[in-house]
Image (cartoon, coloured by chain):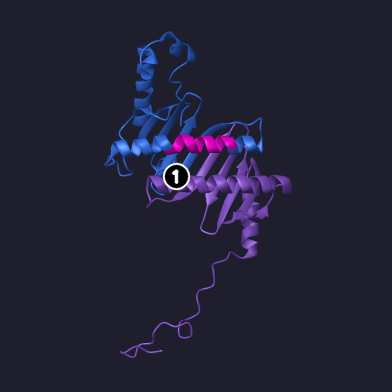
Amino acid sequence: FSSPVVVVSRTARRTESLGPRRARVSSVAMSEVEATLQRINGHKGVLGTIIVNEDGEAVRATTVCDKNGVPVADQNAVVKQMADLLPALASMARNMVRDLDPSNDLRFLRIRSKDHEIMVHADTEFTLIVIQNPAAAE
Amino acid sequence: HFDARGRAERSSLAAPPADPPVTMATNEVEEAVKRINSHKGVLGILIVNNDGIPIKTTLEPAETVQHAALVTHFAKKTKGVIKALDPDNELTFVRVRSKKHEILIAPDVDYTLVVLQNPQ
């Protein structure tokens, strides 16, 4: 799994002072985001990618499929659920790491289950979630 | 106790004794722990039971207690998330990668195996 997506730099945010939160992102940064998402999603075995902002809203999501490549029936529900549950879990992982050693910090979280592997990279502004086939990791 | 057809009904007397719980022989556990521990980069191994009590460890006592509590709690939460996403799915493995090392968590029915390793 390649290095985390740097979706919006702090400077890009500052250039947009008006408009709804989502419009803060400059159009140049957004196309980079799109390109990166497509690149990740194009990897063999990737079943879906979701970007969640700091408010817990999924700002970008590709079609989420099950391990047979069939798109999940209720896309909105599954994206919303993951956007609700996974950033919180990543926070818990971060707290656990810091409780064990205050100078340490969470880098990455991989949750593997029977049906898929969920990879989470969380930073202060965004959480990137990638769902892949559990066998793809081999 | 027999029902109308003469078949023995289930009763604690008639039923065969329940299978004894599957337990790995102690030396098998020792072997596995030794094998994992001898891998390059492994910093320590911990096995906790379902109550979070450490039953085998290669870490120092203080570290053991700390890790047992925090990792068990986190593993439970993670299991909960997977079940919430899909009740038919099951957690098989978790990797928590931090700046300094990686915590591998392998939950099983009765025990959870935790390995700390230096990521390479």
Who's the residue at 72% across and 46% down the image?
B62
> Which stretch appears magenta?
A85-95
Instruction: Please identify the residue farthest to the right as the structure is shown.
Output: B61
| Quadrant the N terminus of chain B occupies | bottom left
Residue B101 visible, this angle: no
Q: Is residue A32 above or below residue A78?
A: above
Who's the residue at 61% across and 61% down the image?
B28
Residue B8 visible, this angle: yes
Quick one: which chain is blue? Answer: A
Q: Considering the numbered disc 1 on the image, is that residue within a helix, a strand or a loop? A: helix
Quick one: which chain is purple? Answer: B
Quadrant for residue A80, please give it: top left
The amino acid type of the residue labelled 1 equals: Val
x%, y% of residue A10?
48, 15
Count all numbered tags in the image, as a single digit: 1
Q: Is residue A24 magenta?
A: no
Question: Magenta residues: mostly which secondary structure?
Answer: helix
Seen in the image, is A128 located left or right of residue A103? left
Q: Is residue A89 magenta?
A: yes
x%, y% of residue B114?
59, 48
The one nearer the camera, A18 or B98, is: A18
The one nearer the camera, A55 or B112, is: A55
Quadrant for residue B39, please give it: top right
x%, y% of residue A74?
28, 40
Quadrant for residue A28, please give it: top left
| Residue linked to disc 1 | B81
The one nearer the camera, A21 or A34, is: A21
Q: Is residue B18 above or below residue A5?
A: below
Q: Is residue A17 above or below residue B120?
A: above
| Quadrant the C terminus of chain B occupies | top right
Q: For the residue carrying disc 1, how many other residues have a C-alpha within 10 Å: few (<14), some (14-19), or many (20+)?
A: many
**Chain under numbered label 1:** B
